[in-house]
Structures are given as structure tokens and as C-alpha cells.
Image (cartoon, grey):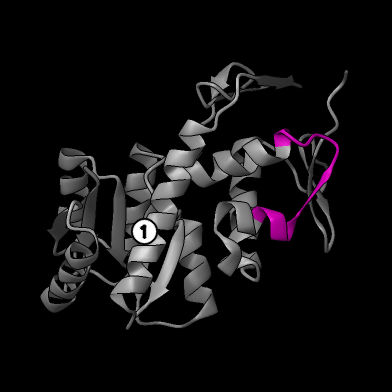
Amino acid sequence: MVKILIADDEPDVVEVITVGLRMNSPDWEIISAEDGQMAVELFRKENPDLVILDINMPRLSGLETCHIIRREHADVPIIFLTVRDDEIEKVRGLEAGADDYIIKPFSSLELVARIRAQLRRTMSSKATAIKNMVEYQGLKIDFVTKNVTLDNHPVRLTSIEYNLLYLLANNPGRVVSHDYLLTKIWGPQYQDALDYLKVHIRHLREKLGDDAQNPRFIFTERSKGYRFTALPE
């Protein structure tokens, strides 16, 4: 049973989303909150598989709510809803930790497709882990347990950050193109969404203590993609 939390202070929007999701996926359980604080409380109580957040909410904004959820549960997919078709607002949402972003008004079919893409990615990353491990300069990546440590300290990654690291670390010394990363992680419809990739690569680097100007692990190949350092034989 997939459980989805919707947080929006407009009851009509919540109802439209709920009806649309139940029509397309009747086996999904839908729970809702009317503000950010209630969303945090419901998240802690219900442990949903995916969260849909409106950016503009009372008590706690969607951005603040996202920050709290990310601190407590790094892996859960989060989709932002907003009426603003604005690049700066989009980047702010991604910076807060969102996995995707959808602009009102939208169709139920589009939202369902976005949700399923997020859920597939989450499930796929668990199902396709290989029995392998990378250890290099204090960084240890266990592809079986998905545990990442740096100098013996745990590194908490979101599902997107882990998947980026997985794809890069499994191709050491090779340039992994922007298009490949965007297609594998977000889907073919995101091939032009370079902002998504840049934001999450920056977050990943920060958590690995990596400096883009003088990297240990992730190198930028300008206009091409990213390269994980070549591992010693």
C-alpha cells in the first residue's frame, strides 16, 4: 500500500488532487494536512511514501516543512506545488530538498505520472543494488545496504543524491553525461532540466566535503557532465 501525504491550505486543491489520485490509483492511501505544521506532525505519525507540498502555506511554509522532513527522513520523495512559473522559485524548491516541482494548474494524469516516477526511482534504487563496495580516501559506499560513510562518519543522502553517487561511483574515471544522469534519475522528459542536476550535485558535494574547485571525488567536465575520480586498481 502506497501512502501519500498532501499538504495544501486550499481545501478545493486537496480535494481535486485526492479525487484525481484515487481515480487513477485506487489502491493508494491519501492523507492530507492544511498547513506546514500539521504536515510535519502527520509525516511523523504516518510515515508516508511520498509527500506533496504547496510552497505557500500558513504556520510553516512548504520550504520550511521540506527542510524539517529532509532532516528527519532523507529518502522520502517530495514534490512541490506552486502557482509560480519562476526559475528562482523552482531553484529555491530544489535547494530546500524537493525531488520534483509541478506548477498549478496541472492535470491529474501529469501528477500521477510524476508520483509514479518518484516511487519507481525509490523502489528501483533498493532493488538494483549490487553486491559491491567502493572505498577511497575515507569515503565508503556500500551498494548493498546503501550506507555511505566519510572518515567513519555516516553521510545522510536523499534518494536522488545516493542515485547520483551510485551512477558516478560505478563509472570511475569516466565522464557521465548530463543527459544520461537526468534521464536515468528523473526520466527522459527532464533532459533539459540542468538546474535539477546542478542543485543535487552541489548538495552531494557538500555532504561529501568535496570542493568543486579542488575536488577529491566528483569532477566537473564542463558542458559534458561529471566524473567520479579514477579508483586505484
Is residue 176 within the magenta segment? yes
Identity of the residue drawn at 47% across and 33% down:
126
Total numbered labels? 1
Three-letter amino acid code at the position of disc 1: Ile
Is residue 160 in view? yes
Q: Position of 91 compared to 15: left or right?
A: right
Tell me where the magenta segment starts and ends, as one range: 169-181
Position of the C terminus, as image quadrant, is: top right
Q: Is residue 152 magenta?
A: no
Relative to 130, residue 223 above or below? below
Describe the element under mark 1 as helix, strand or loop: helix
Instruction: From the image, tell me which residue sits under label 1.
Output: 115
Residue situated in front as seen by the camera: 80 or 65: 80
- Horizontal side, residue 141 vs residue 10: left or right: right
Q: Is residue 139 left or right of residue 20?
A: right
x and y, in percent, of residue 29 in the image: 16, 51
Residue shown at the point (52%, 27%) measured from the top left: 146
In the image, what residue occupies the spot 64% across and 50% down?
A: 201
Describe residue 166's horizontal placement relative to residue 88 as left or right: right
In the rendered view of the protein, which quadrant contains the N terminus?
Answer: top left
Residue 138 visible in the snapshot: no
